Image: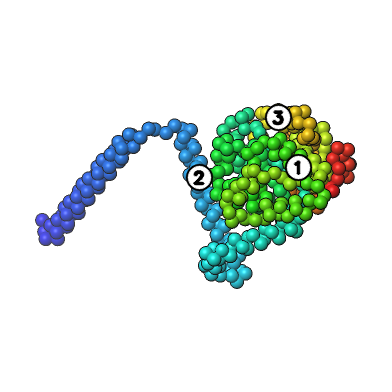
Amino acid sequence: LTGPALQTTAETTMEKSDDIISQSNTAAASVDATTTKEQNTTTKEDDPPLSKKALKRRKRWEKALEIKKRRKEQSKEIRRIKAQNEGRDLDAEREQQKQNEKEGKGWEKREKLWNDRCNKGNIDESFRVCFDCNFEDQMTWKEVNSLSLQLRYAYAMNRKSPMPLHVHVTGVKSGCDTRKHLEKIDGFPDRWAGRAYHVHEGSLEDVFGSALSNVVTSKDKDDKQEGDNNAAKSHGKEEGTEKDDSQQSQPKLRPNHQLVYLTGDSENTLSTLDNNTTYIIGGIVDRNRLKRAAIERAEAIGSNNSTLPIKTARLPLDEHFDFKGSTRVLTCNHVFEILLKYRENGYKDWGGAVMSVLPDRKDIHEKEEKKDEPNKDEEGKS
């Protein structure tokens, strides 16, 4: 071979050698990776395998976390853009908020806003709402958990409402499942009482039976209003006092106070709401399983307690809406929110109150406007 040819052959041989070395290294790395993978597989094989259903649940959970994280980031971005357009400095506001929390100014501000709403809404002269939690032994653990969530939703709605109400939750006995769920919430029941949301261990009959038998007279009216104001508006610096109020105190009712149990099985229809009445909502989450449970409960109370007159009534849903096959069964918090919205609307416009509360999946349509006919069993607003 000549010189140039010999050089070319040598270069070709070196390139082939480099390729062989590279392939050897790649093969070695592949073997190492395979070995590591087998070791990991061996380790994972020690754990019990997940079923298809468990894998689906895990995927749904991971997807929900991703969606929650994305929505949180989007919400932060929206707030940042809004603040930027308004010329605000979010960092300075956060620092000021931390300083207010240290000095207690945040609590004072919230307390003032709450007192203003109570005074403006005239909370002591309005109707009351009671959740009758006497059905726990007929519900499953999952249904009881749903009920506790609905009670929390109702508390949040009442606390944020421009016209809050006095709300009573009866039958939440010590040690019952409903109370165990609620006790996980910070501030229950002490701070709830300071926001006009009173939780009683006694039953509906015990709480309101005793309250009606001790109805204040006209000359004691001012004392009653002052006491109710203190119960609803004080945040409660002494925790023991709040607890006594939320669990042991009776509702302070006016003379001729009435009780109306709301149930879809009633023959009476509400035309409006009376301000000297407590409207009772059955604490039932049964997926429409417990037929006529609420009305039978109301009838039993009336027959067994001669001093506790109780009527029944239903919301005017059929008179204002076309459900088109959709269920008329409403959750406890939806019924409460409808009553709250109806009051905020000036004791008129049932249609607007219901439409603003029920979710779109109900697929209901409001009927043509129709004048409400007075109900012989339910008087108008007092």
> Can you tell which mark lies on residue 293?
3
- Colour mapping: rainbow
Residue 116 horizontal/vertical position (percent): 71, 60
Q: Secondary structure at mark 1?
A: loop
Badge nearest the viewer, 1 or 2: 1
Q: Secondary structure at mark 2?
A: helix
Please give the name of the residue rendered at 75% of the width and 53% of the height, measured from the top-left corner.
223
Does label 2 or label 3 sit earlier along the sequence? 2
Can I make out residue 198 in this image? yes
Query: Where is residue 280, by image quadrant?
Result: top right
Q: Which residue is mark 2?
A: 63
Q: Nearer the viewer, residue 29 or 169?
A: 169
Q: Secondary structure at mark 3?
A: helix
Tell me which amino acid carries mark 3: Ala
Q: Which residue is mark 1?
A: 214
* Neighbours of disc 3 within 10 Å: few (<14), some (14-19), many (20+): some
Please give the name of the residue rendered at 71% of the width and 41% of the height, measured from the top-left corner.
130
Q: Are marks 1 and 3 in contact (CB under 8 Å)?
A: no
Q: How far apart are the two marked residues, 1 and 3, measured between alpha carbons? A: 29 Å
Can I make out residue 366 in this image? no
* Neighbours of disc 2 within 10 Å: few (<14), some (14-19), many (20+): few
Residue 191 horizontal/vertical position (percent): 60, 51
Residue 175 horizontal/vertical position (percent): 55, 36
Tell me which amino acid carries mark 1: Asn
Q: Nearer the viewer, residue 138 or 37?
A: 138
Q: How far apart are the two marked residues, 2 and 3, measured between alpha carbons? A: 39 Å
Does label 1 or label 2 sit earlier along the sequence? 2
Please give the name of the residue rendered at 69% of the width and 36% of the height, measured from the top-left corner.
206
The N terminus - image quarter: bottom left
Residue 157 horizontal/vertical position (percent): 67, 50
- Looking at the image, the residue that sits furthest to the bottom is 87
